[in-house]
Amino acid sequence: MQAERCINRHSESNQNFRYPFICIYTLWVASRQKASEEEAKSLIAGSDPVRSAMSLFGLGRNQRTFRPKKSAPSGSKGAQLRKHIDATLGSGNLREAVRLPPGEDLNEWLAVNTVDFFNQVNLLYGTLAEFCTPENCPTMTAGPKYEYRWADGVQIKKPIEVSAPKYVEYLMEWIEVQLDDESIFPQKLGTPFPPNFKEVVKTIFKRLFRVYAHIYHSHFQKIVSLKEEAHLNTCFKHFILFTYEFGLIDKKELAPLQELIESIIVPY
């Protein structure tokens, strides 16, 4: 399958890239300092992180979602693992929340969390849909240095340049196809996961990261103006800790937000 491409639009020596990135990083650090430990715990507490995200971003008021929420695979240990995630998230310990529970199957854990992170990113982007338009974001970028082009290897085999909202639309549709494919995400109890399951999950996480990268580089000022930066930061921290725990995204793919990511990982 020919994957979509990440294009480095500037040379590594181009100094024009660093200034806007440092501004974002400074705002991010300030927002982290502004949130107390009790605030952070309240952000991730609750019986359902997706419902919590809906409330935090106002989705409970306007019901604006980019795509319908997906449920964990019903034929797996999804419900049991879902309870474990809720309990550990509610404790305020994100590092503990991402760890594989003792005695549990790695693929089951990856499957349940893949659905969760899809829902989170789906909802986060949905809150910005009115600002992320083809006019405002004619290409899918992460700052002036990185541009993402789309290909799924089936309907679109050659990477094409599309607007950011179109890229996210293609991405969410593609992920839904993977999640609904029972040969990849089994629904029936006892059905084995495919041998390449982790590779599929890695591709999903790599592409979900690009949505975060676009939000931080193109829409973080709007997030700050809405006073929602602490919520975004907590979701991103959870996402990054999980990807690092299981090696789901290559380091080179994380480059657009590397400085932010290091500030998350180093304390752990």
Image (cartoon, rainbow, N blue to C red):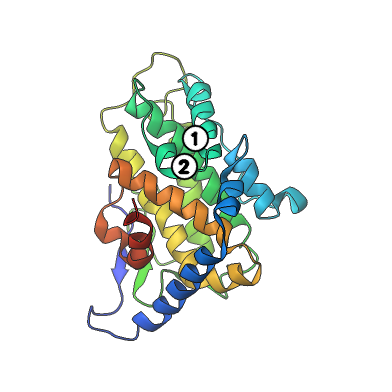
Up-down: is 41 above or below 7?
Answer: above
Spatial separation of the CA atoms under disc 1 and disc 2: 6 Å
Who is closer to the viewer here, 229 or 146? 229
| Outermost residue to the top | 190
Q: Position of residue 233 (x, y in %)?
A: 50, 58
Q: Amino acid at mark 1?
A: Thr
Which residue is at a point 38% across and 34% down the rendered structure image? 110
| 15 displayed left or right of 26 | left
Q: How many marks?
A: 2
The residue located at (52%, 51%) in the rendering is 121
Residue 199 spot, x, y in % from top left: 28, 39
- 185 in relation to 66, above or below: above
Left or right of residue 83, residue 101 in this image:
left
The answer to whether one can see residue 98 in this image is yes
Residue 93 numbered tag: 2
Lateral position of residue 216 relative to residue 228, left or right? left
Q: Which labelled disc corresponds to residue 211? A: none
> Image height check: is 2 above or below 160?
above
**Residue 138 visible in the picture:** no
Q: Residue at x 65, y 65 (%)?
A: 130
Sequence-first disc among 1 and 2: 1
Is there CB contact under 8 Å for labels 1 and 2? yes
The image position of residue 11, as x and y in percent, is 24, 80
Counting from the top left corner in percent of width and height, residue 132 is at: 58, 67
| Disc 1 packing (10 Å; few <14; some 14–19; many ≥20) | some
User: Measuring 54% from the left and 47% from the top, which residue is drawn there?
Assistant: 120
Task: Find residue 88 and name its label.
Answer: 1
